[in-house]
Image (tube, rainbow, N blue to C red):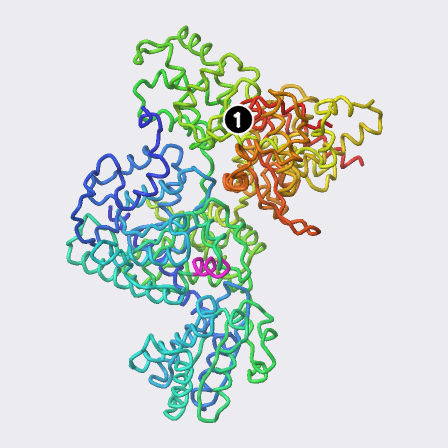
Amino acid sequence: MKIQRTVEEAIVLLRKRLCDPDFIFSLFSDSPDSNYSKLKFIVSSSVTEACNNSILLLGPRGCGKNAVLDLVLEDLLKEYPDMISVIKLNGLLHCDDNCALKEIARQLCIEHELMFSKMASSDDNSQFMIAMLRECGLAHKTVVFVLDEFDLFAQGKQRLLYSLLDAMQSVSSQAVVIGISCRLDADQLLEKRVRSRFSHRKLLFLPPQKDDLQRLLKHILLLPTDSTLPHDYVTDFNSRISNIIADKKFNEIIDKLTDADCTVSNFVRFLFSAVCCIDSKSGYMTLENFKSALSTVQRQPKLDCLKDCSILELYIMVCIRRLEFKEQESYNFNSVMKEYKTIYDSVQNVDNYSRNVCLRAFEHLLDRQLIEFADRGHNQCIEFRSVKLLISPAELHQGLKSNRSCPAILQKLMNQEAKFVANG
Amino acid sequence: MSKEETPQVTRRTTRLSATHTPNAIQSPTKSINLPPLSLHNLVYGEQQEPLTFDDLISSLPGRKNQIFDLLRLLGPVNSPMSPMFVYGSASTGKTSTILRVFRYLNRPFVYSSCRTCYNARQLFDNILNQLLLHRKSENNGYSSAKKCEKPADFVNLLKEALVGVVDGLKRSSSSKKLNGCVNGSMVYLIFDSLELVRDWDKSGTILPLLFKLHDVLKVNDVGLIFISSSSLDTYHSETGFVDPISVYFPDYTEEGLRQIFMRNQANPKLRSAFLDVVLKPFCRVTRRLDELSTALSPLFKKYCEPLDDLNVIPDEETKRKLFSCLQPHIGPALNEILGVTSQSSVEAGIKNNLKRKGGLKKFGNDSIDDIDFHMSTSAKYLLVSAFLASRNPATLDASFFDSTGGSANQKKRRKTSEKSKDLKEASEQELFMKGPGTFPLERLLAIFQCIASSDEYSLENDEDPQETTGLGGDFGENNLMSDILLQVSSLCNANFITKGGSCPLEGSTRYRSTISEDLALKVARSLKFPLSKYLYRR
């Protein structure tokens, strides 16, 4: 019983770490040429030198742009209390100008303990923002605007960006605008009048190298020795982890994972599934955990779908494939049925189902998104709308093989075609 | 009987009564004076016996692996989790499994389905109402707890509400007041039928927002669970998002289906003998539970019909006898899986079955001679003429409907040469691809007048139908023409005729008949109208 509680505690600890991006990225904060240090230098110099600045943080999703920024801001708030106020906007939420101005006014009010009026017009809010910027500048207080999903702010007229950056042109203001985007061409999206007011500082966030991932792995999975967990358990746990990391098979797993997607978030997701697989009885991580985690992270939904298809649905898929193979440029349910009939006529012991049943199976395939309507005809019956296959022949082939109940005749029909391709 | 028959509580009741009245049979106490909601209400099945692990596993046959997966990902009490995405095709028990698991864990959660909350605003309101323990009632004029229109407001309010609820849970768990009722201080938000969000307007921003909600909120004590019937790769998004961890619910296997259909049976031996016979052929067509249960329940009744005593334990011989009785019904029932849409109740279906016994081989053709809905005579004529207008080429109208009448039919028979065969194939192909053709309203009315008037005068047989049409047909005007345009529009509304796009040259709306040939023949037969005489056969 006591062991189980210990294991549970350890799992909770690991899960807490994995769900906390700040913890994960704190690993990369110590080296001098990391993005953390660069960003911190830029922001802190604009705080101390009382100047305006603007930066873009660019990089693919899940590389820790937000997390690093959070770490930096947290540190700076500790270092310079009462000199920084942070306003956070998100392009998904505030890409509409009025909404964004309202949110800025709201956060400024909270920050400076003022009353926020919900009824204030967009113009009022805009004037309030400019006035507050001036006031903050006079009080030598830096306002940091964080614009997450920066590319979404660049849609439309870009009024918000313009008014923000324009307000920063005056000497009295003191503000930093930090844009975060996963589009590497985010600065090209800006209008000319906005771009000219934007300092073109960019920080690129890249997926980590392999040795960084190794460090990350140890950073996350090794249990701390100075916790409430029993000492023996922790040393045992850690030595097992080190053994696994040294294992060649484990490295293969990691390679497979990073070949597809080597961002930190993907890696963390993989570790999270692995941690979830820990057997609460034994309480240690095994290589098996990582293997099953890999299979859950790298799923192939279309193949899963094919594996689930009933036999009639597979028949229809094969018919569609045959039609495609005959280079019929467009086909619909009726032509599929015709093909089905020819198969039925030419090959013995094929199940024969009525049209209605086939139509139902056809609808199931549409539901499963293995096929899709190719046209946008809204007032046509399903039978007449042309469809297209959403999987490749190779996938279909593999799916037929993996489906245990798939009749041999279907595989043969597919194989015939493959042979034909090979010969022709 | 039907209650026993359906092995699971039907989908609708599961979803509707899910959060508040989990077991429809046991809780009739949805009384008039509702007590104010408390934190208890965030737990599923608060008044009931706790569920043991074995109960959980046995109540959901065939879902053992998925339950283990879910439990592992949800983790121990008060452990944070990254967003989870549960997917699998329809009726694979996604929702019921998750709700059962939460009932077992006794953890607080907020369930909202994107089907009942049909737009973003409804969804936001629904979640906030549940979190703020707000109930719409007469006193507050059925209004929501918070007015929330924009996603930005929603995120702010949600954050506030979540922090409030989590604090409340923490306080009560420390004071041991709710001990044993509510487990832990994590709140889980469950979004069901997420695939529907793709069709909402502004889905381009709502979906990424939902997927990113965990990062945007930055509240550690919240878990997000998405339930969807289609996999993650079908969620296209311009801005992209970090994938949640996915859990896949595969379709039930034959074995799983058998276990489900064996539940709550009075006579398991008999049932299993029945399933031995039926399950296999049906599984070849579909393994969807909802369709199978509707198809199998009348069949089981049929199977039991020859038996006097339902509790008899069948031996080999009775099994064989029952099988031979049932066998002729399996095929038609299989074909009728689709017939679920015809809105006839199960009873009617059985009656039809009885009727069809004679003509089993010719099922779907001539054995059913009456249409199962009422329609006025003029509407029937309209339907038939719309069908004709859709099927026949417009150039042949004159030869079909002029004074010589049916003789045109013989005239067009020509010798079939190679070329015309090719042509025939091509045109057949075209019919396959294009479907029924479109026609302007004028043509529909002309054909209608022709066939309606020719039918009317066929008894007297003294006047040329074409001439009557030309004269304006005073008889027709009185009886049939009075509200034809109204009828057309009501046929359009009933989807027998669809309004197509307008013709680019003429600019008038074009129509198209959607009914099948079988239905048209049926309607024509009820009018005693010789439809086949007027049909252009290629």
Q: Residue at x 53, y 37 (%)?
A: A364
Q: Nearer the viewer, residue B322 or B106?
A: B322
Residue B407, percent across and down? 74, 22
Predominant SS of the magenta segment: helix
Left or right of B107 on screen, residue A59: right
Q: Nearer the viewer, residue B158 or B258?
A: B158
In the image, is residue B73 part of the stretch drawn in magenta? no
What segment is highlighted magenta in the picture? B203-212
| Residue B390 visible to the viewer | no
Q: Residue at x 62, y 29 (%)?
A: B451
Residue B274, percent across and down? 41, 17
Name the quadrant containing residue B98: top left
Q: Nearer the viewer, residue B349 or B511?
A: B511
As drawn, A131 above or below B76: below
Chain letter of the residue beneath label 1 in the structure image: B
Residue behind mark 1? B284
Q: Residue at x 55, y 68 (%)?
A: A59
Tag 1: amino acid = Arg
